[in-house]
Amino acid sequence: MRDDVQDYYGKQLTGSDDLQTNACCDQAPPDYLKPLLGQLHDDVVSRYYGCGLVAPQALAGMRILDLGSGSGRDVYLLSALVGEQGEVVGVDMTDEQLEVARRHQDYHRQQFGYRNSNVRFLKGYIEELDQLDLADGYFDIVISNCVINLSTDKAKVIADVRRLLKPGGEFYFSDVYADRRVPEALTRDPVLYGECLSGALYWNDFLNLAKRCGFADPRLVESRRLTIDNPAIEQKLGNIRFYSATYRLFNIDTLEPACEDYGQAVVYRGTLADSPDAFVLDDHHMMETGKVFPVCGNTWLMLAQSRFREHFDYIGSFDRHFGIFEGCGLNVPFEDNEQGGTASCC
């Protein structure tokens, strides 16, 4: 299947118009990114097959690794955001895509006014990152855009990402997920696989896999239902629903499996240039500037031990525990006699 994917993206697809479904279609970018996207070379943009936006905040000076970088659109966009003192490394297995990316390296250096290019591209498989010259704990952020679903060894990819991240570093990526496990027969269909559908993980399998690989509390940033818009392919897929989703996973050893309440809170200072009024951590944490925002212990750590540390004030500690954080989705599982009923002996 890996050879089929390599052929699909290297030889069969010459641009996004060749895709047979809309699974690998990009979302409209926020206004602040549009000028930068307008500076990218048309050849790079036309061979882009992402399904989400992988440009998180606070990127100045960061070292970023892009898994499945393709023609280099995300690499070059991020190269503008990290600045000349930052670095972006793209890894891809497809010669044709790498040729497009490398051919326009000097073009983008000039577009952004850099003396030296701050990007490099490596040929390799994302399941074999340990065979590339990448040092453990080197990267602040790892991104990927609609590529993990194409991997034949997703557990190896996620484990390697954690190894390559600095403590407090972040895996921020968009991908396609299914609402159930895809039948094995469909996973052998090269077109369905190449279209980012039949290799998609069942969402709950992904969450459990991420936790086994050391990312204790995956956070969903945004998601949307995908429509296929191809009757023949829709018939093959039956009732399976697919979603594009962006997750952020923090490399913090002390994160707990659930959101625990320690009476903590944070106050966003409003110091991120593109978010003066509020900071959005995930789909249920929107923190207004200057407002005390109660958080669980995990959220407190994600901010205090990451590149976001200087943008917040922190209230509380871990000295006292109050149980599960309200709204976490977990409750005390035991019957409460105060709610009625009688106790009995076994």
Image (cartoon, grey):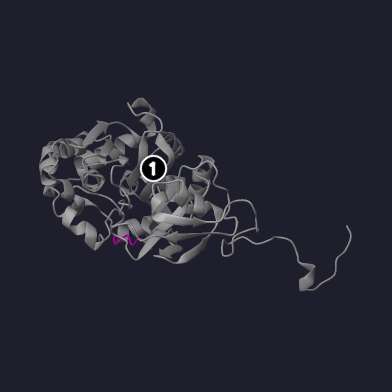
Q: Nearer the viewer, residue 6 or 318?
A: 318
Q: Is residue 326 left or right of residue 85?
A: right
Q: Position of residue 276 (x, y in %)?
A: 32, 63
Q: Position of residue 200 (x, y in %)?
A: 41, 49
The answer to whether 90 is drawn above or below residue 27 in the figure is above
The part of the chain drawn in magenta is 226-230
Q: Is residue 147 visible?
A: no
Q: Position of residue 95 (x, y in %)?
A: 21, 33
Q: Is residue 229 magenta?
A: yes
User: Which residue in the structure is indicated by mark 1?
Assistant: 188
Q: Nearer the viewer, residue 308 or 194?
A: 308
Q: Is residue 88 left or right of residue 43?
A: right
Q: Is residue 142 visible?
A: yes
Q: Amino acid at mark 1?
A: Arg
Q: What residue sits 74% from the left and 61% below the top?
A: 334
Q: Nearer the viewer, residue 180 or 37?
A: 37
Q: Position of residue 22 (x, y in %)?
A: 28, 57
The answer to whether 84 is drawn above or below residue 202 in the figure is above
Magenta stretch secondary structure, dominant:
loop
